[in-house]
Amino acid sequence: MPIPWSGCWIWTGGFHGTRPIITDDAPKQKTRTAHRVSYELFKGEIPRGMCVCHTCDVPACVNPNHLWLGTQQENTADRSNKGRTARNFGEKCGHAKLTWSDIAEIRNDARPAIEIARSYGVSQATISNILNGKRWPSAGYVRTHKPGNEKLTEGQVTAIRADHRVGRVIANEFGVSQGLVSLIKRGKLHK
């Protein structure tokens, strides 16, 4: 369906998510994107590995005058240059199970990571990554010790670095998390 003021021909057939699709009538019923079919019909064959890109940035547009061929890298660069790169992280991400409020509570929780993980329905790795600042980054957050524990002395830090036992055993002895022991051993904290 043409839209006169934009020049776009908006696909009114089937969609898979936001992608306009065409299912062939052939016995295999191959599904292809409508803009690729439009390009082939009006401009010719699409070389293997090439993307059909939109100058209009309207995914449902099938106007061949709005379509051009580019590599995946060119398509990605075009998207980034036009400011269309997704920047959803944290609770804005559609898959997020946690909120920023949850993150603040997690970072102040003195329980072991496995217990925190169970209470929020996420993995222990997720909690460790949050506590270590690898996930849900926030300005100014640096984990120096587990809340509720006194800061470790330099002597304790030296002892942790020299200790060759399993991190869990060391953590229990010093009353800190395994993640903190790992960070100290890797030189990420208490330099």
Image (tube, rainbow, N blue to C red):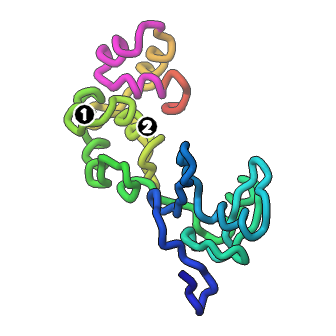
Which residue is label 1 attached to? 116
The residue located at (27%, 31%) in the rendering is 149
Helix, strand or loop for the magenta stretch, by majority: helix
Q: Quadrant of residue 9?
A: bottom right
Residue 161 in percent (x, y) is at: 50, 17
Q: Which residues are magenta?
A: 164-183
Vertical relation: 90 (above or below) 82? above
CA neighbours of label 2 inside 10 A, class few (<14), some (14 to 19), many (20+): many
Residue type highlighted by circle 2 = Asn
Q: Is residue 179 left or right of residue 46?
A: left
> Which secondary structure, mark 1?
helix
Q: Is residue 94 above or below residue 121?
A: below
Say which quadrant the C terminus sits in.
top right
Question: Is residue 172 in the magenta section?
Answer: yes
Q: Residue at x 46, y 63 (%)?
A: 14
* Quarter of image, res 125: top left
Residue 175: in magenta span? yes
How far across and down, in percent of the image, does residue 41 sit? 71, 66
